[in-house]
Image (cartoon, rainbow, N blue to C red):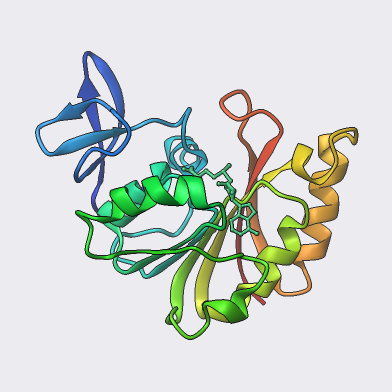
């Protein structure tokens, strides 16, 4: 499967790994201007590494929900266009601001992704919503943010089963989340991310 423009497989100390071009953020290995994008630390990297068809070509406008300290979203901003990064916890958001400093296309928003009305005045229509909030109500967050997605856009969702219910069978949780998503999305593909990310399901969907 084709990688987005701006994402390459490169060798780091003899290991082939995904890489993007940009300022290092979290002490990751570099090779000239390229920085290693570790699939163990990033669900989106795991998805791309596995060859899932995300539809990403590079240069898209992105809304990223659950940006944390900026590990993954900084790589996204390296190959994408304008990238809006929503994170509601103040502590990781400080590191996110640092990751954004050398990236003029990365816009951190200290906001709650369950309340898109609070950032609707800032975010333009986007080609891609990436969601990794790891919190209860993951389908609802995706549905509430569907309003930003262009008709031909893509939702790239990472569902963490234990965030919905620590005791339930992950497969049952995934079924529930996928059923709830049909209120606004057509699911195109799914992939379990074990063993890199246990009990996580990657979902590619489009607005319905
Ligand atoms: N995506 C990040 C990465 O790969 O670098 C890791 C994200 S971490 C698994 C989940 C993040 O989602 C946490 O930083 C948490 O504070 C944030 N989060 C959870 N619920 C949220 C919400 N309703 N609005 C915004 N951020 C939220």
Which of the pair 71/87 is nearer the observer? Answer: 87
74 in relation to 51, above or below: below
Residue at coordinates 23% horizontally, 38% vertically from top-left?
A: 24
Q: Position of residue 60 (x, y in %)?
A: 35, 67
Q: Quadrant of residue 85?
A: bottom left
Along the horizontal axis of the image, is 116 left or right of 51?
Answer: right
Along the horizontal axis of the image, is 138 left or right of 151?
Answer: right
Q: Position of residue 25 (x, y in %)?
A: 29, 39
Residue at coordinates 88% horizontally, 42% vertically from top-left?
A: 172
Q: Is residue 72 visible?
A: yes
Q: Position of residue 93 (x, y in %)?
A: 45, 51
Q: Residue furthest bottom?
A: 121
Residue at coordinates 43% horizontally, 35% vertically from top-left?
A: 49
Along the horizontal axis of the image, is 189 left or right of 150?
Answer: right
Q: Position of residue 74 (x, y in %)?
A: 33, 49
Residue at coordinates 23% horizontally, 57% vertically from top-left?
A: 103
State which quarter of the image contains the N terminus. Answer: top left
143 in relation to 1, above or below: below
Q: Residue furthest top?
A: 14
Which of the pair 177/97 is nearer the observer? Answer: 97
Q: Is residue 68 visible?
A: no
170 in relation to 12, above or below: below
């Amino acid at each position: 499967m084709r990688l987005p423009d701006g994402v390459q497989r490169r060798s780091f100390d003899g290991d082939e790994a995904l890489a993007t071009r940009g300022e290092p953020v979290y002490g990751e290995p570099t090779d000239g201007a390229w920085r290693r994008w570790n699939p163990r630390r990033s669900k989106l990297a795991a998805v791309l590494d596995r060859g899932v068809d995300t539809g990403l070509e590079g240069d898209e406008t992105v809304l990223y929900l659950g940006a944390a300290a900026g590990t993954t979203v900084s790589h996204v901003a390296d190959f994408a266009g304008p990238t809006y990064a929503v994170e509601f916890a103040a502590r990781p958001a400080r590191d996110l601001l640092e990751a954004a400093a050398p990236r003029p296309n990365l816009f951190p928003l200290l906001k709650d992704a369950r309340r898109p009305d609070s950032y609707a005045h800032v975010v333009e229509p986007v080609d891609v919503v990436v969601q990794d909030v790891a919190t209860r109500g993951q389908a609802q967050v995706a549905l509430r943010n569907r309003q930003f997605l262009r008709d031909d856009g893509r939702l790239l969702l990472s569902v963490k089963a234990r965030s919905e219910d620590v005791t339930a069978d992950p497969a049952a949780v995934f079924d529930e989340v996928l059923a709830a998503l049909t209120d606004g999305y057509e699911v195109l593909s799914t992939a379990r991310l074990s063993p890199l990310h246990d009990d996580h399901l990657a979902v590619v969907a489009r607005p319905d």
